[in-house]
Amino acid sequence: MAVPATAIPHSPTVQFDAALIRKLSRQGPRYTSYPTADRFADSFGMGDYLQAVNQVRALGARNPLSLYVHIPFCDKLCYYCACNKVITKNRSKAEVYLTYLKREIDMQGKLMGDMNIVTQLHFGGGTPTYLSDEQMGELLAHLRSRFRFANDDDGEFSIEIDPRTVTPERVRTLRNQGFNRISFGVQDFDIDVQKAVNRIQPEEVTLAVMNAAREAGFRSISIDLIYGLPKQTLMTMEQTLGKVIAANPDRISVYNYAHMPALFKPQRRINEDELPNAETKLDMLSLCIRRLTAAGYVYIGMDHFAKPDDDLAIAQRQGRLHRNFQGYSTHADAEMVSVGVSAISSVGSTYSQNEKTLEAYYERIEQGELPIARGTRLSVDDLLRRVIIQMLMCNFELSIRSLELAYPISFAKYFETELEQLRVMEADGLLSIDDDWLTVSPKGRLLIRNICMVFDSYLNGKQEVKPERLRYSKTI
Ligand code: SF4
């Protein structure tokens, strides 16, 4: 069954093809980075990061800065959770964390603070609003004392909100504290689904917080949903989608729940008998695409939809869309400095990830070191493949000629093996390819991860891979 989505002028459309998805869905990375984080090496450390910072300076430090701040604490465990978080009601733990976080900010501020202005700030977690108003205010003041921020009109300053942890009053305070974009975890409005995942979040609470965000003048309001949760049915999805569309957010993300209890302990508390089967999940995805595109949302890519006048949709039309660890972004070519436990930075041609446990993170900072635990320096081949994967993920097309102008390669020769795989995908209707362009078709867009995987040399036996690291969710 092929269900064409509503066409939005100048915007990519998406077409749901169940038979094709059934045939091609497999496990694969989400490509928030390339190489993906599971390829980072323990041999990469603070020295390599400092070298990368020096190189960026030597090249004139032209890129603006993007800051990511990780707050790992949550009050209560959601059973579907696959994040790096600490569940605790002991607020003093956040106090301790903030003292170390500020010390890391001091170190990064010395290295990068004078380099350029911060055009993008993102608070993620965990639950960033686990912090009190006062703690948040102090942390932001600390960041501002170490980095220079763009003004409110030019900068994208976003925060992830758990509506259960904030009041409308708190939302207004967050706007006054400088955030101008906000995203809410909703997952599903159905109470039985909420009980099954241990996340009771009354609809009135979410809607009140959303309304407060709109009144407070947040420029973009985003909602996260998940399909494939226990007790979810097409009916509950239909109802949740109706309510979400009525609430009128600027962006909607619809994530596929990947049940991997061997990897993520909280998921062991989910009753597997209550999970929808693969066919129902496909129907749910089809329903989401139909409902959201019919309501006027543009398919951005992967799990993301946005209104045609939202910055993400505009950036995509203008070919400025970018993908980083927070998903799609309008700020390309920024040096990304991330602070907090497990946070990943992207500076120059390197990625570096902080220690993943609080103990190790604190210990490194005690020693006066940046808490970098692993990372990677990209080779020229990595950089080339990263550009290709970015282009495909963000624009659904690749200008082969432009690539050949920017890199000293003949595409046909360099990617001879990849082209063989792409020809098979072309026969399946996922894409078309000629001497100048690789263009992803509307029905290939949902399988964009599969297409990108063709260019991933770590998956295709061209690089050494540790087999135990190959743990990915399904592409659809
Ligand atoms: S899903 Fe979010 S709020 Fe729930 S436990 Fe995980 S990080 Fe915390």
Image: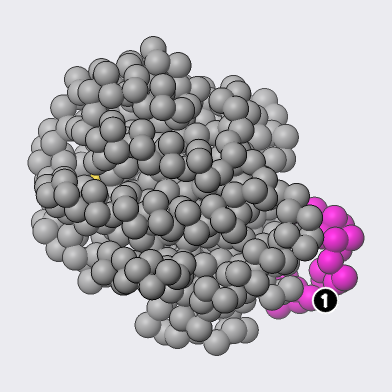
- Number of marks drawn: 1
Q: From which residue to which does the magenta span run?
A: 398-426
Residue 204 percent location from the top left of the image? 19, 20
Q: Which residue lies most toward the top here?
A: 215
Instruction: Answer whether residue 211 is visible to the viewer in this image.
Output: yes
Q: Give residue 427's quadrant in the image.
A: bottom right
Q: Quadrant of residue 288?
A: top left
The correct choice, above or below, for 198 with respect to 349 in the image is: above
Query: Where does residue 66 sit, x and y in percent of width and height?
Result: 57, 46
Question: What is the x, y in percent for residue 428?
Answer: 60, 59
- Residue at horizontal 59%, vertical 39%? 148
Inspect the image, locate mark 1, and give the three-letter code of the amino acid beneath it.
Lys
Residue to which mark 1 is pinned: 413
Residue 419: say if magenta: yes
Quadrant where the C terminus sits is: bottom left
Q: Is residue 213 above or below residue 347?
A: above
Foreground residue, 122 or 313?
Answer: 122
Q: Position of residue 314 (x, y in %)?
A: 65, 30
Q: Residue at x 61, y 33 (%)?
A: 150
Residue 35 shown left or right of residue 235 in the figure: right
